[in-house]
Each structure stands twice: as C-alpha cells, then as structure tokens.
Image (spheres, rainbow, N blue to C red):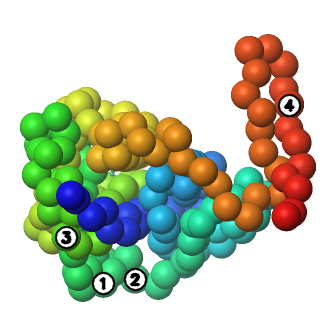
C-alpha cells in the first residue's frame, strides 16, 4: 500500500496590489484541494492572514506561512519537486510517476506569478503542464492536486471548524459546528 506524505505548495513571486487575490486563491485552493501547507513570499502578509482566517473558520489542518526565500526552499527541498508550467510535460503522462515518488517523500508543488527563471525549471524533478496552454496558477494547481489525489480530496473531513456549509440544491446554508 502507498503511504502518502506531505504536500506543500510554494507560491513563487507576488506583486503587491496586482497579485493579492491570485496569491490568496493559490492558498485557498491548496487548502480546499488537499495540500497540507502553503508557503507565500514575505510580501504576501495580507494573503496569509486571509488564508489563516478561512482555516480558522472552516477547519484544517492547514498551515500557511511566509518565507524570505522561496528559491532556497526549492533548492534545499528534501523530497520531490513539481513545477507547474505550460511548457512542461503533460500532467496525464507523468502523474503516475509523480504519485509513486510522492509515496516515499514529501512533495513540493511550485507555482509562479510572473516570469519564472530557468533555475526553477532545473531544480524541479518534474516540470508539469496542465495542458500546454497559458492559463492560471490557480487552475493549474487545482487540476494537478485533483490528479495527484485521484479525487479523494473531495471527500475530506475538516477538523476544528467553527462553521460548515451544508450542501443544498438551492440556497445557502451554513451551520455552526458544535464542540463535543
Ligand atoms: C500567469 S502564468 C505566468 C508564467 C510566465 N509567463 C512564465 O513564463 O513563467 C503564472 C503561473 O501559472 C501557472 N501556469 C500557467 N499556465 C499553466 C499550465 N498550462 N500548466 C501548468 N501551470 C500553468 C505556472 O505556475 C505559472 O508560473
């Protein structure tokens, strides 16, 4: 049986103002779709606070932190590194190999903001394209995580939530979670 290890997402680059929502959505997508942790650049404190607030309200476990050097984190990662890029190998061709590597060691998933420098392509064990068309880091991350977890993340249970959404065909229902 495969033992799945930790999945960390690293957001490379953040342009304050312009990238605020995108960086927040990278973190929220990482959390909702089964990653354990997101590491944001140092200048993305507002996004970090929003992601931490959502985790507080809707549950975890999920860690969010800011770090001074994303590049050093990638370089020194003890495990597998996947860089999501439109120039990479097709996700459907490499997902099995990535899953196999991930069964033995922690996985780091790198997503960019602006132009990603070549050293990141070299540091990655896999450069992976979710289609070879330009689109968004949020969409690429969502599809990649769903492929990695083979859909199991959709059934995940959340711990320590203050509130939960009750799925409904129509309308909105949010309930407080009773503490036992
Ligand atoms: C808006 S793109 C900018 C990329 C930039 N043009 C470059 O050359 O590195 C921001 C990020 O979205 C992700 N991305 C965009 N299209 C992708 C695709 N087809 N597959 C996987 N990731 C993608 C990559 O992580 C990329 O760094």
Q: Residue 104 has which mark?
A: 3
Instruction: Provide residue 39's location: percent of width, then percent of height.
Output: 48, 71
Which residue does the numbered mark 4 point to in the structure image?
Answer: 173
Label whose residue precedes the other's in the sequence (4 or 1): 1
For marks 3 and 1, give the CA distance.
22 Å
Rendered image quadrant of residue 133: top left
Which residue does the numbered mark 1 point to in the structure image?
Answer: 72
Label whose residue precedes the other's in the sequence (3 or 4): 3
Q: Callout 3: 10 Å neighbours few (<14), some, many (20+)? A: some
Front residue of this view, candidates 16 and 25? 25
Is residue 69 among what the camera can see? yes
- Residue under the point 33% across and 81% down: 73
Front residue of this view, candidates 110 and 41? 110
For marks 3 and 4, give the CA distance.
40 Å
Residue 14 as seen in the image, left or right of residue 78? right
* Marks 3 & 4, CB-CB < 8 Å contact: no
* Marks 2 & 1, CB-CB < 8 Å contact: yes
Q: Secondary structure at mark 3?
A: loop
Q: Callout 4: 10 Å neighbours few (<14), some, many (20+)? A: few
- Residue under the point 85% across and 52% down: 177
Q: Callout 1: 10 Å neighbours few (<14), some, many (20+)? A: few
Which residue does the numbered mark 2 point to in the structure image?
Answer: 69
Q: Callout 2: 10 Å neighbours few (<14), some, many (20+)? A: some
- Which residue is outermost to the top? 170
For marks 4 and 2, give the CA distance.
41 Å
- Residue under the point 49% across and 68% down: 37
* Marks 4 & 1, CB-CB < 8 Å contact: no
Rendered image quadrant of residue 164: top right
Instruction: Provide residue 151's location: percent of width, then percent of height.
Output: 39, 37
Instruction: Provide residue 141's location: percent of width, then percent of height.
Output: 39, 46
């Amino acid at each position: 049986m495969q033992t799945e290890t930790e999945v960390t997402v690293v957001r490379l680059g953040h342009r304050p103002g312009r990238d605020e929502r995108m960086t927040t959505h990278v973190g929220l997508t990482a959390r909702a779709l089964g990653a354990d942790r997101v590491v944001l650049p140092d200048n993305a404190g507002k996004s970090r606070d929003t992601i931490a607030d959502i985790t507080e309200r809707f549950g975890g476990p999920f860690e969010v932190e800011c770090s001074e050097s994303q590049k050093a984190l990638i370089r020194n990662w003890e495990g597998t590194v996947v860089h999501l890029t439109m120039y990479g190998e097709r996700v459907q061709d490499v997902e099995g190999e990535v899953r196999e590597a991930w069964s033995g060691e922690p996985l780091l998933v790198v997503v960019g903001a602006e132009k990603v420098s070549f050293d990141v392509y070299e540091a990655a064990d896999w450069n992976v394209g979710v289609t070879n068309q330009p689109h968004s880091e949020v969409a690429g991350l969502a599809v990649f995580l769903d492929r990695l977890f083979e859909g199991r993340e959709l059934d995940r249970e959340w711990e320590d939530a203050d509130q939960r959404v009750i799925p409904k065909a129509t309308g909105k229902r949010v309930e407080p979670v009773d503490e036992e």
